[in-house]
Amino acid sequence: MNCDPLARWYRWLEYAGFGRALERRRTAFLAAMTTARQVLVLGDGDGRFLSAFLQTNRHAEVDTVDSSAAMLTLARQRVSDTDTPRVRFHHADATRWQPPAVSYDLIVTHFFLDCFTNGELRPLVARLSAFAAPGARWVVSEFHQPDAGLAAWHARAWIAGLYAFFRVVTGLRVRRLPDHAATLATAGFRLEREEIARFGLLTSQLWRRESTTGFCV
Ligand SMILES: C[S@@+](CC[C@H](N)C(=O)[O-])C[C@H]1O[C@@H](n2cnc3c(N)ncnc32)[C@H](O)[C@@H]1O
């Protein structure tokens, strides 16, 4: 997936399709993130979440990883000079990126896990979970497919349209949402809070790693 051609239009296309709905999902649990100290943000795109997070949490150090150089350039521009020293920008493929030897107490993925198939997501989550401290939180925003009724049809149309769009513009090969909930649960995370929006199409979730799960690097 190459988001470079999309980067400068990304925000405006999002607002055209969803207004501020995705932004509300990304910031849904900001208030619960103020105590985090070592944070990993994956696939943040143009950095709008990162910028909002840094304004809310004045102490955390952040590793942010994105495979798109153009997205990272926009993200860098959004971070103030004061906050820059506490952010490490990594231009890398998250599936191969080797985290520094830190123990994250917060991992954040907004509309990122849907860029992977189940077969790709499992090893990615398992590998990165090894860098999550016991009790660490994982905040997720994602598209969501309701089971039945009009909401199911509405979501199916949006999700199919979005995957078709990303396939043409970025080369994304994924065609359906992976089961990120099962993957996180298998990695030892438990769902603590969830907000559903847009007739079930959007979800924000706060997961916590069971404190008994070991940490290793
Ligand atoms: C759909 S966009 C989501 C951007 C942003 N998080 C949001 O909430 O809108 C997916 C982002 O993940 C990045 N990405 C996709 N696959 C990646 C990978 N394997 N490693 C790192 N970043 C990746 C893309 O470059 C893009 O910035």
Image (cartoon, rainbow, N blue to C red):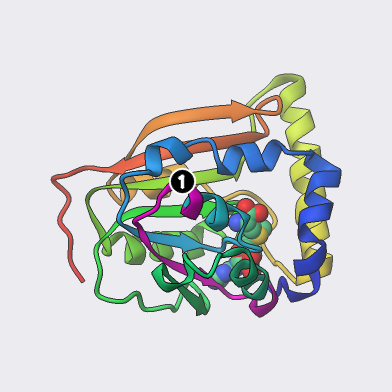
Q: Residues within 10 Å of mark 1 (few under 14, many from 20)?
A: some
Quarter of the C terminus within the rendering: bottom left
**In front of the other: 8 or 66:** 8
Q: In the image, what residue occupies the spot 41% across and 29% down?
A: 193
Work out whether residue 144 can be spotted: no
Query: Residue 93: x, y in percent?
Result: 52, 77
Left or right: residue 191 compared with residue 93: left
The quadrant the N terminus occupies is bottom right
Magenta run includes residue 173: no
Residue occupied by mark 1: 56
- The location of residue 56, given as percent across then percent down, is 46, 46
Q: Say which quarter of the image contains residue 216.
A: bottom left
Residue 195 visible in the snapshot: yes
In-image side of 76 versus 186 (left or right): right
For ligand 1, the image quadrant comes to bottom right
Reply above or below: 148 against 173.
Answer: above
Residue in view at x 31 percent, y 76 percent = 100
Q: Toward the viewer: 43 or 156?
A: 43
Q: Start and end of the magenta stretch? A: 54-70
The location of residue 82, given as percent across then percent down, is 47, 66
